[in-house]
Image (tube, coloured by chain):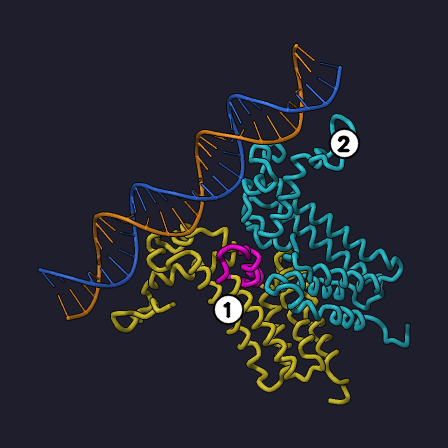
Chain colours: A yellow, B cyan, C orange, D blue
DNA sequence: CATGTGAGTTACCGGTCAGTAACGTAGTGA
DNA sequence: TCACTACGTTACTGACCGGTAACTCACATG
């Protein structure tokens, strides 16, 4: 799908000042605009203009806007997993600390002033289910299922009494943080109380302190 | 704002088969369509057609689509508070049980097959902040602030050690339930683990069992 | 009967949207 | 030199969108 990235004539030029290929400029611009303003409210004209090109170059790189949107959602997904893995990498053999680190990272991400919530979840709000957007909503559903799976897995590895329940509860907190963010600027929202909730729910699923 | 509801010629006709006024038909239709498909993806033509009338009658009843949207958000707000008050009415002097009843009701509402999440929160995703939609996003912000205030108030009345934190944590769970709902059909999502989380967080904020 | 009102109908406007056709051009490599 | 690639430019289509003008009709009330 992203085969257009390789240079058909050989190796990519490594010059520092080289202008990126138009496809990449368009894609990066689109990702930023989609996230900031929503998918439906950003037209292909606006994307092309912001990327310093025009609509024709857009349609030479992408077969349709919907394809670009799907690519955008896949990219957001990749970035989430990258951040996710980075956050938990510090505690390779301590699932409990992994969860805490994951939510600490989530907290800073959500409190960032540029945060506009969860790109995938927001997309689920924007795309009508009944239309021909099955590909997009399926992308979102798959992503959310994977989030749930990973949280439950961490809860299980941590030794939770009911790992499915704990994973789900953590997911509620995580998505709640994303969702409330849209109505509260910066770090002024309920997200401030995230970490105590995480620790309380974790603790309630572990044997009492002395037994560990 | 909704003064058009009263009949200028006297009392409303009480006939059972009487067709409602066109404004009400349009408004009810719009509320349903907005909630089901999102605000941006529903045009005034579609609303008018679905209400059995046409665009001109629409613009005789509403000065603009944005006005209708604002009215829609206010209506959703009113319904939320109505359900809220109904849910907690059974335990007038037991804030703790009020919270539990509130979340039990929330659970039922979210697991309903017609649930598409929180109308106000979804609107916050759809409306771009920078545009001239200040009225709409302010409506959403005001609503979310009020949700937070009420939850914190209940936590305080319950005697929580840190009522602000508990209220915020409950809000994260609540909005997390709404948000995850969009990616999981029916009652298959993480919302299933809501009630234990609520009870655990409440319990962690109360003195130990024997002391009560 | 006259008048006002609520509502249906048709036609239109200007703007935006996704998507396409046709052409021009600078560079690059055989 | 020739051809090919990547990109820019202008102009266009058809659909849709929010919003308006002008007309018609049923009906209720004085």
Q: Quadrant of the C terminus of chain B?
A: bottom right
* Left/right of residue A209 with respect to residue A65 in the rendered view: right
Chain that bears disc 2 = B
Report whether B110 appears left or right of A105. Answer: right
Dot 1 corresponds to which residue?
Answer: A77
Which residue lies at the image location 51% right of the left edge and 55% below the top edge?
A: A131
Badge 2 vs badge 1, beta-carbon distance below 8 Å: no
Which label was assigned to residue B47?
none
Snapshot quadrant of residue B65: top right
Is B201 rendered above or below residue B118? below
Q: Pinpoint the chain carrying mark 1.
A: A
Q: Above or below — where is A167 with respect to B117? A: below
Residue carrying label 2 = B13
Can you see residue B95? yes
Q: Residues within 10 Å of mark 2 (few under 14, many from 20)?
A: few
Residues under labels 2 and 1: Cα distance?
57 Å
Helix, strand or loop status at disc 1: helix
The quarter of the picture where residue A168 lies is bottom right
Taking the image as drawn, is residue A184 in sight? Answer: no
Q: Residue at x 87, y 62 (%)?
A: B94
Give the magenta part as a residue range. Answer: A114-136
Verify whether residue B23 appears in magenta. no
């Amino acid at each position: 799908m992203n085969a257009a990235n390789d240079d058909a004539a050989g190796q990519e030029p490594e010059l520092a000042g080289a202008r990126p290929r138009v496809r990449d400029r368009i894609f990066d611009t689109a990702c930023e605009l989609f996230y900031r303003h929503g998918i439906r409210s950003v037209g292909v004209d606006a994307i092309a203009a912001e990327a310093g090109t025009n609509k024709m170059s857009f349609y030479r790189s992408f077969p349709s806007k919907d394809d670009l949107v799907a690519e955008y959602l896949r990219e957001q997904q990749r970035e989430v997993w990258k951040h996710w893995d980075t956050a938990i990498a510090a505690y390779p053999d301590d699932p409990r600390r992994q969860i805490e680190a994951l939510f600490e990272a989530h907290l800073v991400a959500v409190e960032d002033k540029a945060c506009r919530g969860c790109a995938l979840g927001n997309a689920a709000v924007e795309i009508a289910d009944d239309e021909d957007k099955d590909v997009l909503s399926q992308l979102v559903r798959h992503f959310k299922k994977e989030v749930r799976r990973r949280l439950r897995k961490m809860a299980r590895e941590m030794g939770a009494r009911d790992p499915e329940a704990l994973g789900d509860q953590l997911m509620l907190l995580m998505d709640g943080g994303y969702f409330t963010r849209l109505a509260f600027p910066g770090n002024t929202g309920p997200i401030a109380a995230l970490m105590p909730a995480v620790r309380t729910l974790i603790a309630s699923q572990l044997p009492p302190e002395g037994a560990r």
